[in-house]
Amino acid sequence: MVNQGHRNTGSLRGTLLIAAPAMAIWDWCDVDPTLSIGGHTASLDAAYLGNSHDINGKITFIVTVPRGTPVSIGKVDPGVQLKIRYDGNSSNGIPVAISAGIKAKTNFDTKLTVVLDEKQLVVENGTTNNSLDYSFVTA
């Protein structure tokens, strides 16, 4: 009888690293700004195709409405700055102008989505460090 005991097979263990291609994903805020403009509900969403670590500061929305238009702001993500400006007068409906800006270290594709009273009005495409602008008139 032969005692084989413990045999060391000299197995070589290693780790295989596979380099995956860099991927960009659309990123957006957890709480899109929602506001009431003259009794109409508006939801604003600005997204960017890139890494949140490359964004400089907050995503900024500027909403311009006529003087005297009642505006109330719902919840807003901490990464968003929402400014309301009053300019001009309203004669037939409420003219609304929206500007969204995303500053970044590099250029990313961006998009602005505006939903009014649960109806999507637009998706505007652009790039970081440029403003996305959209205007509409409420009925």
Image (tube, rainbow, N blue to C red):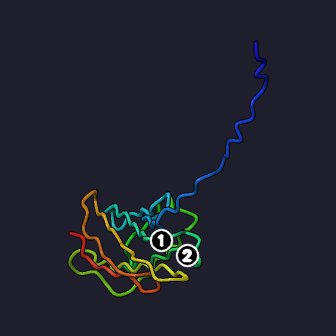
C-beta proximity under 8 Å, tags 1 and 2: yes
Q: Secondary structure at mark 1?
A: loop
Eyeballing the image, is 38 above or below 98? above
- Residue 139 drawn at (x, y percent): 20, 69
- Which residue is disc 1 drawn over? 50
Amino acid beneath label 2: Ile
Mark closer to the chain start, 1 or 2: 1
Residue depicted at 48% across the width and 68% down the height: 22
Q: Residues within 10 Å of mark 1 (few under 14, many from 20)?
A: many
- The amino acid marked with disc number 1 is Gly
Q: Residues within 10 Å of mark 2 (few under 14, many from 20)?
A: some
- Which corner quadrant of the image does residue 134 belong to? bottom left
Distance, label 1 to label 2, CA atoms, is 9 Å
Work out whether 57 lies above or below 40: below
Task: Tell me which residue sits at (76%, 22%) in the image.
Answer: 4
- Per the image, the residue denoted by label 2 is 55
